[in-house]
Image (tube, rainbow, N blue to C red):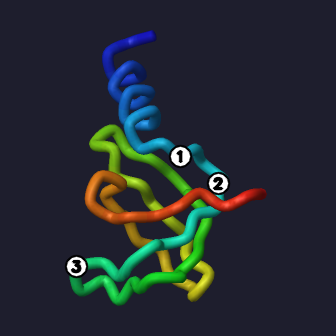
Amino acid sequence: MDAYGARLLAARIRAGVAVGMRIELVSDTADDSGLCAGDRGVVDKIDERGQVVVNWDRGFVSEIDPERTPFQRLAA
């Protein structure tokens, strides 16, 4: 595994989710993304910075910081 692959793997482990996993926000986000508690979506990607890109059920894609945005994993 090269250095990029190692960073990507570490970011995925830190995020605590996998691509394809469904998540639900536990509380509103502090930013102006419009996300609120109860929003659900599917993890589309996890970048090397650890940001989780989510395809939200409301029809848009955005990224969240898993260390600052409270969410829970949902059963498949």
Q: Earlier in the sequence, mark 2 or mark 3?
A: 2
Specify the farthest residue to the right. 76
Which of the 4 image quadrants contains residue 33? bottom left
Q: Residue furthest top?
A: 1
The amino acid at mark 1 is: Val
Q: Position of residue 36 (x, y in %)?
A: 41, 85
Amino acid type at image mark 3? Ala
Percent of width and height locating residue 61:
47, 74
How far apart marks 2 and 3 lie (CA) works out to: 23 Å
Is residue 30 toward the left or the right of residue 10 in the image?
left
Viewer-closest of 26 and 45: 26
Tell me the quadrant of the picture where the C terminus can be found: bottom right
Q: Could you tell me the amino acid type at mark 2?
A: Met
Q: CA distance from mark 1 to mark 2?
A: 7 Å
Q: Which residue is mark 1?
A: 17
Q: Nearer the viewer, residue 4 or 23?
A: 23
- Residue neighbourhood size for the residue with mark 2, other residues' Cα within 10 Å, grouped as few (<14), some (14–19), many (≥20): some
- Give the mark nearer the N terminus: 3 vs 1: 1
Task: Tell me, yes or no, whether the two marked residues, 3 and 1, touch with CB atoms within 8 Å.
Answer: no
Q: Quadrant of residue 8?
A: top left
Spatial CA span between label 3 and label 1: 21 Å
Residue 49 on image: x %, y %: 28, 42
Q: Secondary structure under badge 1? A: loop
For the point 33% across and 26% down, which residue is it?
7
For residue 20, side relative to residue 49 (left or right): right
> Which residue lies under the disc numbered 3?
30
Q: Which residue is mark 2?
A: 21
**What crowding class fits label 3: few (fewer than 14 Cα within 10 Å), some (14-19), or many (20 or more)?**
few
Residue 31, label in figure: none
* SS at circle 2: loop
Q: Nearer the viewer, mark 2 or mark 3?
A: 3
Q: Is residue 46 left or right of residue 68?
A: right
